[in-house]
Image (spheres, rainbow, N blue to C red):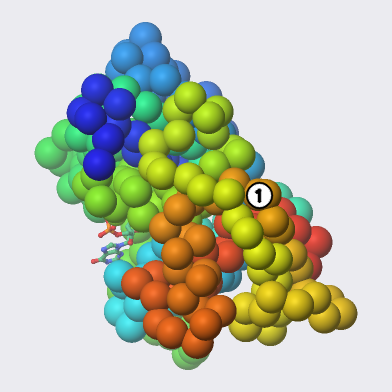
Amino acid sequence: MPQSDQQQTLVLIKPDALKNSLTGYVLSYLSEFHTSLRFAGVKIVHVTGMLAEEHYAEHRGKLFYPSLIEYITGVIHYPATPERRRVIAIVYQGSDAVRKIRDIAGPTNPLIARETKPGCIRALGTLAPIKDGKGATIGERMDNLIHASATLADAEREIKLWFKPHDIPPSMHPYATAACGEHYYFSKGKLTTRYSGGSICVLAPGNVAWKSDLEALTLIAGGSTASVSLETVVAKYLVNEEKENP
Ligand code: GTP
Ligand code: MG
């Protein structure tokens, strides 16, 4: 785990913040001047279903899960303009980064954020009804503008899920990396070490990857079970690819 003065944390500026033109507000609030945290990585991501489902895996099966996936993939806020569906993913680094950003983000529920912590970012969020197929309200969606890693362990999982080592300057790499010794391809939900038509090469010999991802790929390619799913490893390699799910 990184020392506390080099902590890193993942922030996502979600589609509702982009749609409501709150990007500048969020970035100002999280700026080095206010937080003493520095950018380690930034990318614009068209969020695939695979990435969304891995990111929010802990909520699978809950009533609000389908609407949460539609929300983070941008379907809710940009129903007619798929090209505008994206989030801004940022890695911030510095002392106490996880706690500092969670504190500025505020409570998960925007209503509670407004009541208990006026001025926090999520106080500007909204609650929206979740409807069933017949139009009846069955719950509420929390459009809360940003995601922020909740713990150091979550930050590690999430940074490795969204970012490749090459997205972050080498001097700021938070976790161990290693050079890949194999070709790894992804196609139709499966990992292979041989190219077949339509598959995407996620890693080639010499490419630098998170060491834990390479360990997982070695196990999966050998038919064993790894501590993380194949989707968790490959989702970031499919980000902004022409083919979302080869
Ligand atoms: P994130 O930073 O987005 O991960 O939020 P969080 O860490 O404050 O909350 P959590 O990880 O528990 O939930 C992830 C997202 O799921 C939240 O941002 C909400 O949009 C949604 N969510 C979580 N709990 C509930 C709930 O009880 N009801 C509803 N409707 N949505 C929820
Ligand atoms: Mg969370």
Q: Is residue 75 visible?
A: no
The residue carrying pointer 1 sits among few (fewer than 14), some (14 to 19) or many (20 or more) residues within 10 Å by Cα, namely some
Residue under the point 46% across and 76% down: 219
Q: Image quadrant of residue 187?
A: bottom right
Assess mark 1: CB under 8 A from ligand 1? no
Residue under the point 45% across and 64% down: 215
Looking at the rendered structure, the number of numbered marks drawn on it comes to 1
Residue at mark 1: 207
Identify the amino acid type marked 1: Asn
Q: Nearer the viewer, residue 14 or 228?
A: 228
Q: Nearer the viewer, residue 20 or 195?
A: 195
Q: Position of residue 132 (x, y in %)?
A: 43, 85
- 221 with respect to 57 (left or right): right
Quadrant occupied by the N terminus: top left
- 240 with respect to 165 (left or right): right
Local SS, label 1:
loop
Q: Is residue 117 visible?
A: yes
Residue under the point 59% across and 38% down: 167
Q: Position of residue 133 (x, y in %)?
A: 49, 88
- 18 with respect to 30 (left or right): right
Q: Image quadrant of residue 94?
A: top left
Residue under the point 53% across and 30% down: 170
Q: Position of residue 93 (x, y in %)?
A: 37, 27
State the residue lying farthest toward the front: 181
